[in-house]
Image (cartoon, rainbow, N blue to C red):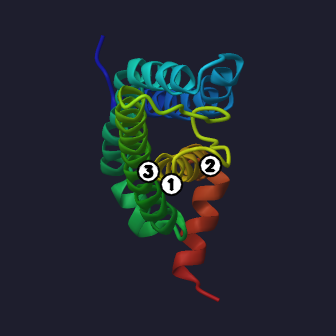
């Protein structure tokens, strides 16, 4: 069986969508489930350890999703190059999508770094015999040591930014896919040729 450019586009789109879904869905589950589930445990140090362990185990899968999204996006941009030049709005959304994806990957990396710092600081405090008081993995209490609380707040912000950016990436991807419809293509080309 011989593949065509359309087949390659469909494969790249499927890889992109599955990667984006993995990235978005896994992050939402982590924020809503993993982080909060620690509150069921008695010890603050265990709340941090469980979340850190779960996020650490998910990290390779999450980065696989991000990598699939990025590589497939490059392939889709390559196959849609003429469309970017001819169809008004297509290139602008494509550039926005690329920026959103890079910001999302950076936020993912920063959230992971924050989690690592929280884990290190909590373990150091635990070794000193300090009691670690936290509501859950990213929510401090008034008794949480200041440095841990600071990193928890940073991680919480980054972790909320990640699904927002991953979701925006999916929305932009949907817009671009809809732009392939015949009517949308004709309208975009006419808007490019007849501005105003």
Q: Label 2, on which residue?
A: 171
Distance Cα–Cα, label 3 vs label 2: 18 Å
Of residues 68 and 93, the one drawn nearer to the viewer in this rendering: 68
Distance Cα–Cα, label 3 vs label 1: 17 Å
Judging from the image, what secondary structure is the residue with disc 1 in?
helix
Of residues 13 and 183, the one drawn nearer to the viewer in this rendering: 13
Position of residue 10 measured from the top left corner of the image (x, y, whole percent): 45, 29
Of residues 150 and 156, the one drawn nearer to the viewer in this rendering: 150
What is the quadrant of the C terminus in the image? bottom right
Label at residue 150: 1
Q: Which of marks 1 and 2 is nearer the N terminus?
A: 1
Tell me which residue sits at (33%, 35%) in the image.
67
Q: Are marks 3 and 1 in contact (CB under 8 Å)?
A: no
Quarter of the figure with residue 127: top left
- View extreme (front): residue: 129
Q: Nearer the viewer, mark 3 or mark 1?
A: 1
Horizontal arrangement in the rendering, residue 116 relative to residue 169 (left or right): left
Position of residue 155 measured from the top left corner of the image (x, y, whole percent): 50, 47
Q: Label 3, on which residue?
A: 107
106 versus 54 height, above or below: below
Q: Which of marks 3 and 1 is nearer the N terminus?
A: 3
């Amino acid at each position: 069986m011989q593949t065509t450019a359309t087949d390659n586009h469909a494969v790249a789109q499927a890889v992109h969508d599955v990667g984006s879904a993995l990235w978005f869905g896994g992050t939402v589950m982590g924020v809503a489930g993993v982080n909060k589930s620690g509150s069921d445990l008695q010890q603050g140090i265990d709340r941090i350890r469980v979340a850190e362990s779960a996020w650490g185990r998910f990290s390779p899968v999450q980065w696989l999703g991000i990598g699939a999204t990025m590589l497939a996006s490059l392939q889709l941009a390559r196959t849609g190059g003429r469309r970017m030049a001819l169809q008004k709005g297509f290139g602008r959304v494509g550039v926005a999508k690329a920026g959103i994806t890079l910001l999302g990957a950076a936020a993912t990396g920063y959230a992971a770094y924050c989690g690592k710092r929280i884990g290190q600081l909590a373990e150091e405090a635990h070794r000193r015999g300090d009691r670690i008081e936290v509501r859950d993995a990213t929510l401090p209490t008034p008794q949480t040591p200041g440095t841990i609380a600071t990193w928890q707040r940073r991680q919480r912000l980054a972790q909320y930014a990640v699904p927002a950016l991953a979701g925006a990436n999916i929305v932009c991807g949907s817009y671009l896919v809809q732009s392939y419809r015949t009517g949308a293509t004709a309208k975009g080309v006419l808007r490019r040729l007849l501005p105003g």
